[in-house]
Image: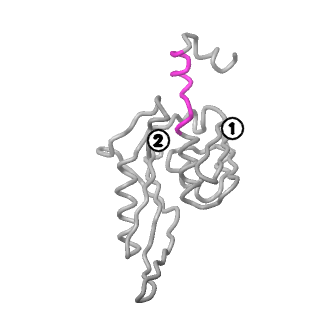
């Protein structure tokens, strides 16, 4: 995951964090050769500490367990910190990757995570408990996860915005 387009995002080292992994999807991939079909597996996994740190990884192998292990290792290398404000996101955000589009909107306490499978796994790993979301376009889990991370990485922390603008925190929310 390239972070060049997200200047305000900080990378996180996995050491010392208690990470939980969630398997988003496994796909069987076949390669046709002269001797017949060769099957391999690709797995996409999201890891997070449920306190604002998450990452995703893709693993490919001839065995399912090996693919999942590789995906977890890749996910631990791509950990980033996401702003979480009172169990929800600070503002509405739209994310896009390939043919997948994801829209997320903050929700009040008690709403829960209103999201589809791949988006739900990412949001729960980050530690967001109240959010409304909609996935449009392609429902391919790989692209949906990447679109969700695109939206999360575009989020800006209100304290950081107040500091950049030189105004008080209340003015950021109330205009």
Label 2: element kind:
loop
Q: Which residues are magenta?
A: 153-164
Residue at 40% x, 60% y is 71
Horizontal and vertical percent for residue 108?
69, 37
Residue at far front of view: 34
Q: Characterize the local packing of mark 2: few (<14), some (14-19) or many (20 or more) Cα atoms within 10 angstroms.
A: some
Provide the major secondary structure of the magenta segment.
helix
The residue at the point 65 percent across, 43 percent down is 131
Q: In the rendered view, does 174 fall on the left or right side of 148?
A: right
- The quarter of the image holding the C terminus is top right
Q: Which mark is residue 108?
A: 1
Which residue is the site of mark 2?
Answer: 51
Q: Which mark is residue 54?
A: none
User: Please, what secondary structure does the residue beneath circle 1 have?
Assistant: loop
Where in the figure is residue 152, as x and y percent of width and height? 55, 40
Distance from disc 1 to disc 2, alpha carbons, whole Å, reads: 18 Å
x and y percentages locating residue 72 in the rendered image: 38, 58
Give yes or no for contact between labels 1 and 2 (Cβ–Cβ under 8 Å): no
How many marks on residues?
2
Say if 132 sits above or below 41 in the image. above
Vertical comparison of 162 with 7: above or below: above
Name the image quarter holding residue 91. Answer: top right
Give the residue at x 54% y 36%.
Answer: 84
Residue 38: percent from the left, percent from the top?
42, 82
Residue 157: quarter of image: top right
Residue 149, above or below 85 = below
Q: Residue at x 65, y 47 (%)?
A: 102
Q: Residue furthest bottom?
A: 35
- Camera-nearest residue between 73 and 95: 95
Q: Is residue 42 magenta?
A: no
- Crowdedness of circle 1 by 10 Å Cα count: few (<14), some, many (20+)? few
Tell which circle, 1 or 2, labels the residue nearer the N-terminal end: 2
């Amino acid at each position: 995951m390239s972070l060049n387009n997200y200047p305000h995002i900080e990378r996180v080292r996995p050491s010392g964090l208690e990470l939980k992994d969630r398997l988003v999807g496994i796909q069987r991939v076949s390669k046709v050769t002269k001797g017949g079909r060769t099957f391999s597996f690709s797995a996409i996994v999201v890891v997070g500490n449920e306190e604002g740190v998450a990452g995703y990884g893709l693993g490919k192998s001839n065995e399912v367990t090996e693919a999942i292990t590789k995906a977890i290792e890749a996910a631990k290398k791509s950990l980033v910190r996401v702003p979480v404000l009172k169990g929800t996101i600070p503002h509405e955000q739209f994310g896009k990757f390939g043919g997948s589009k994801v829209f997320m909107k903050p929700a009040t306490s008690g709403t829960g995570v209103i999201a589809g499978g791949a988006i739900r796994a990412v949001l729960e790993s980050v530690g967001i408990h109240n959010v409304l979301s909609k996935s449009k376009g392609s429902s391919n889990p790989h692209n949906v996860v990447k679109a969700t991370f695109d939206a999360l990485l575009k989020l800006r922390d209100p304290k950081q915005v107040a500091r950049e603008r030189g105004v008080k925190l209340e003015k950021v929310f109330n205009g």
